[in-house]
Every structure is written in structure tokens, then in C-alpha cells.
Image: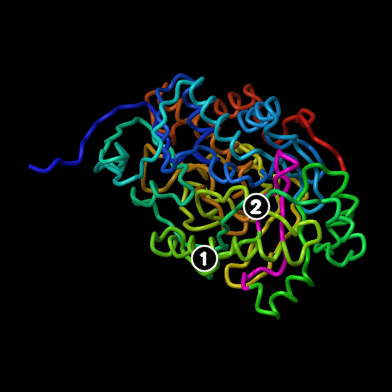
Amino acid sequence: MRPALREKTTDYDVAVIGGGPGGLPAAIAAARDGARTVLVERTAALGGAAASGLGILGYLDRSGNKALGGIAQEVIDRLMAIGGSPGHFRCPVHNSITPVSPDLVKIVAVQMCQEAGVDILFEHELLEVDVDESGTMRSVTVYGKLMMTRISAKVFIDGTGDGDVAYLAGVPHTLGQDGTQTMQPSTLMFTVTNFDLERFWDFLDEHPEEMGIKEAYAAGYDVDFLRRTRGHCYIGLTARVASAREAGAFTIPRNQFIYIATASERLLAINTSRVIRIDASDPVELSKGLETGYSQVWELVQFMRENMPGFEEVEISQIAPALGIRETRHFAGEERLTMDSLYSEATSERAIALSAYNIDVHSGTGDGIDLHVVEHPFGIPFGALLPQAVDGLLLSGRTISVDSTVFAAARVMGTCMAIAEAAGIAAALAVRDGGAPKDVDVVELREELGAKGAILPGARAPQPAGAVAP
């Protein structure tokens, strides 16, 4: 008789599916509030895109005021204490950039979960969702290493990014951008070493046209800014990319080259790969996207060696373990945040997090980026976390209910972390009161978030830790 798959059942107060920015803070927050919590992650590391070396956006608004506190700031404080981040840095283009060490993110994430009492299930894939006849979610089934585990819980949090839990639960959704269903492209991040930035900046002194952002909002974005700002993102080489493309040596559908500082001055994160025209919620298309991403990584290494002074001997340090996904499914919530309701009184009164990034749409069919400045941070209302048609479930991270333009600002990691902490506390409050997430008192939720350092509309923000003004 051949061995069969093993089966197991467990029971928790709160089950968080997905250990990236939309899930990790949720699990920590719920457990700290006394809920027995499990965090299910499909890979071998927590942190999501932050574990790829990508700098985190959203900590400071355009004026340099702090927009994120709570667990989001605690993560950075802990990273700073061990050399895993130099802090927050203002940027004329991105408002702020917070460089991180990809590997130290993974370590700090596990430490914070262990201290909070979160049970972690690494390398477990979601298989099934059970919703009863009343529309209440009761369990999920996950698979890992020839074992199927059925997890029952009082509240579930979808931190998967693509909304896999909400999809299986039957929450109404759309794909891609409103009107077109076009999805923003994906990127295979990687880090490089063995470069000389001083030589590259000297080259830019001689070729200022290769500083790629010339719009009025980017005043001050020049070589001097790069030199004096430890945490920066370089965007440019438009002419050299065009020349390489004409020669057949640059096939990536992007018109500029991008690198981002990490916590180590010996490593840069390369954010130039661009995989277009795929639906990353489809496993076959996702697999093809990864194939394309690996080809692009090597093409970019060759481009750096041949076109970037100071990068002649550059080497790959690490390739991200997963494709970085910007956009797939958008879910319908009890409240949908739109451009028309960004700054409404109702939105501000029910806000459980702030979004301080700009509207940043990467073309899903071409090679450009459409960026619109957001002068003032806006609130994310609690109703955007409450899915239609299903109870016992909270949306988190980039699964929340917003229109596709708002999504282009709210999708970044920093904002997702703030949303996740609110989801975790809301789940714990629902468990405590024996009710559903939709019954959580928003006033109480906001008060608890504020008491734990979260920053909400109208609150006086403390000075940003580790910030450096350009």
C-alpha cells in the first residue's frame, strides 16, 4: 500500500495568509493583542518584496512629515539597530526611500513573530477555503511537504497580495486597471556588488542629461542629490538605453535604468526588469514571467558592464526568490476608496492608515511610468478592509478595496504594512468581542492604533527616526 498525503487539523483565533507587508504586521499585531495567531507563508522567508532588497516607500510624505508609525516604524528601528537600514531619506521623486537589508529583514521578521507568539508555517500553499451557508469563512486548507493542514479560525486575514483567499472565498473582484484590465508589470529584483558609484557619478557630472527625471516636481533631483543622500534611487541613462536598444542589446520594455540603495553601501538593488502583459495570478503566466525575468537579469548585468562607468566588473549578489508583483486582482469592499473620496471627512474619520506615496502607474504594455504627485497623505478607511459577500475575513495590503488610480499610490510596502497592523488589531478586537470584523468599533480601533504609535489623519506626527533631509 502506497503512503498517502498526511492530514492535520488546527484551530486558531486569527489566521493570516501571506507573510509579506500585507500579512506580517497583521500577525504580529493580532498576537500582541492576545489572539492565538498563525501566519502561513508560501515561501521560505517573511517580508515579501522587502526581502528582495527593494527600498520601502511611504514612510514620509512630500513635506517630509512622518506618515507611518507603529509596527512599520518598529521594523525599521530594529533594522537600524543591527545595520539593516540607514533610516528614512527624503526624495524629490518618491517623497521618501527607506533602504533595507533583504536578509536582515527576514531575520527581524521571524524574531518579531516569535516574540509575539505567532506560529509560522513556511512553505505552505493555500489550497481551499471553506465558507458556510451564511457566508462566513470557517477554515482554510494549506499544503506543505506532503501534508494538508486544515486551519479553523474566528477571523482570517488575506495578506497574499493577489487576494488568493478572497478569490477562493468568492469575494467579487476585477482584474487590473479600471476600464482596461491592463495590469502593471512585474519585476524580478536583484542586487549587485563590485561597483564604483563615485566613478558613475563623475560620468553623470559630464552627462547631466542622463539624470532621467526632468519634470518640475523633481526639482533638486541631480547628481549632488545622489552624492549627499545615502538612501536614494537613481533613474536615468535614457540615451544609453535607447542606444543599446537600437543595437539590439536591450530588449527589456523599459526606457530607463533604475538602481536603489540598500542598507549596505556594497550592494545596490536593480529595479529595471519589466515583465509586461502577464496576469501574475495565473500560475502558467507567472512561470513564464519568471523565465523572462531571469533572462532580463543577465541582460541588465551585461548592460551595466558595457554602458555604466564604474560598473565594468559588476557582479550579481542575489536574485529575489519570487517575481515582484505590482497588480493583479482588485476586490470589492464595503467601502471603495476612490480619487473623489480621498480627502472626504468620512474617509478621514474612518481611516486606519495613511498613504503618503505618489500615484505611480507603470505601463503594463509599454516602457514608461506615469507619475502624479500626491501633495498630502490620505487615509485608508476601515470599510476598504471589509470584503463584500464574505464575513470572518479582512482584506489587507494591496487586496483592499480601492480604485485602480488610488491603488497606484496605496500599493507600496510602507502603506501595506500600516494597513496590515490595523487588520491585525481589528481581528483581535473581533475575537475578543465574539463578533465579526464588520462589527468592530472603528473609534476603538483608531484609538488603539494611535496608542501603539500608528499615524492617522489629524494626528500630530513625531519626527521621523533616521531621516535625512536632502
- Residue 245 image point, x, y percent: 69, 76
Residue extending farthest to the front is 313
**Can you tell which quarter of the image residue 53 is in?**
top right
**Label 2 Cα neighbours within 10 Å, binned few <14 / some 14-19 / many ≥20:** many
- Please, what secondary structure does the residue beneath circle 1 have? helix
- The residue identified by callout 2 is 409
- Which quadrant holds the C terminus? top right
Q: Nearer the viewer, residue 290 or 26?
A: 290
Placement of 263 over or under 313, stated as above or below: above
Contact? badges 1 and 2 (CB < 8 Å) = no
Position of 222 with respect to 461 (left or right) is right
- The residue identified by callout 1 is 292
> How many numbered tags mark residues here?
2
At 43% from the left and 64% from the top, the residue drawn is 285
Q: Which mark is residue 201?
A: none
Magenta stretch contains residue 91: no
- Please, what secondary structure does the residue beneath circle 2 have? helix
- Which quadrant holds the N terminus? top left
Mark 1 belongs to which amino acid?
Thr
- Residue 463 image point, x, y percent: 79, 29
- Residue 172 image point, x, y percent: 40, 55
Magenta region = 251-271
